[in-house]
Image (cartoon, helix red, strand yellow):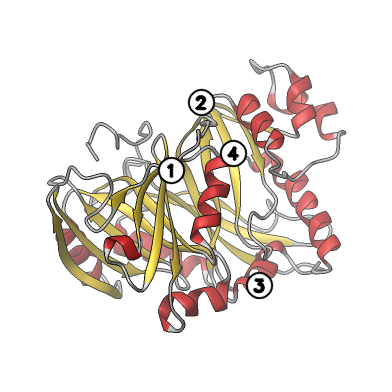
Amino acid sequence: MTMEQHTPQPEIVVPEAEDFLPLLGTDHVELIVGNAKQSAYYYMHAWGFQPLAYKGLETGSADSVSYVLRQDKITLVLTTPLAAGGPLNDHLNRHGDGVKAVALWVDDAAKSWKETTSRGAVSVFAPETREDEHGKVVLSGIETYGDTIHVFVERKHYNGVFLPGYAAWNPAGEVQSLGLKYIDHMVGNVGWGEMNTWCQFYAKVMGFAQLVSFDDKDISTEYTALMSKVMSNGNGRIKFPINEPAEGRKKSQIEEYIDFYQGAGIQHIAVATDNIIETVTELQRRGIEFLQVPGTYYDTVLDRVGEIDEDLAPLRKLGILIDRDDEGYLLQIFTKPVVDRPTMFFEIIQRKGAQSFGKGNFKALFEAIEREQSLRGTL
């Protein structure tokens, strides 16, 4: 992988962040899944990810198989155990399909590990060098909330397809991209009273700063509530909103997630596009299901957000939400869960200047989630 291939999304400056690591971008996201081969087919043909690399029995990996997929700057690794027992099966049994590792691209993985562990991070593994004929990669890892980990990836001396131990993977059949560009943010759900603990972790251990905070007055409906804070590194390439439940009359989406995931974890991955209408139209054609807000949402939305470049009719037809901040506006939509448990889902987002997270859409969005919870009998 060349540096040119891995250029991250445009920067924003977060002056309060120390950014002592520093982080260059998201390297990849690894999901532990029950059937990596079939999951790869889903992400290729429903989501437009291109096949990139493979690790399994044929490459000398006897305990697990991994398929690597890429779309522009988004890289997914889908991993499945090949034998009973062990940590991969433990992860599957407890959580179902879900994100295990959020890998962060750094210039110095040993320094990143030393800086974070000296500030209190729990080590998953110390810096290790992996080599093959294409060069060497240095990796290290630390724990974060739940069973989620961060892996620091230093690849400046590597020119292979992905990482040592992986072979290029070029299956037959054409895959059509959907125009997904990069990971905009990744949202973590944590337990009661844990949001501030993990925000402090990202501030103290990783040098992040808080971008924005939402309390239960901002994010509440008649029935449920939650609280959220958004943490960002200094160049704004890595943004982690952290959610926790808040008191409400019924069980919130965060509580439902934690019940079914059996702990804290990644709730959703927000992926950016330059044309959300085209991207969502094609996703729906391929069978991806989205949360839908009532049609009345669109009767007054332009009164709230003002003039936009897009025609409102296709946004209404697709169920795309609109919000504005001081910098501009954004368009966003959320899938229904993409795994069997009501846990992980995706957000599609197009930013037209806005750097916020759709506060004006929270009520309509969470009422839509509550309708799905009611159908599942978990509200």
Compare marks 3 and 4 and give the one earlier in the sequence: 3
Asked whether, in this view, residue 30 is left or right of residue 335, the answer is left
Image quarter of the N terminus: top left
- Secondary element at image label 3: helix
- Secondary element at image label 2: loop
Give the foreground label among 2 and 4: 4
Rounded to the nearest angstrom, the CA distance separating label 4 from label 1 is 27 Å
Q: Which is nearer the eye, 317 or 296?
A: 317
Give residue 353's mark. 2
Q: Residue at x 43, y 43 (%)?
A: 171
Give the foreground label among 2 and 3: 3
Compare marks 2 and 3 and give the one earlier in the sequence: 3
Give residue 260's mark. 3
Name the residue carrying label 1.
Answer: 171
Rounded to the nearest angstrom, the CA distance separating label 3 from label 4 is 24 Å
| Residue 151 lies in quadrant | bottom left
Compare marks 3 and 1 and give the one earlier in the sequence: 1
Give the foreground label among 3 and 1: 1
Compare marks 4 and 1 and give the one earlier in the sequence: 1
Percent of width and height locating residue 22: 23, 49
User: Mark 4 is on which residue type?
Assistant: Ile
Q: Residue at x 28, y 55 (%)?
A: 166
Asked whether, in this view, residue 235 is left or right of residue 29, the answer is left
Name the residue carrying label 4.
Answer: 348
Tell me if I can see residue 357 in this picture: no
Q: Residues within 10 Å of mark 2 (few under 14, many from 20)?
A: few
Q: Residues within 10 Å of mark 4 (few under 14, many from 20)?
A: many
Q: Residues within 10 Å of mark 1 (few under 14, many from 20)?
A: few
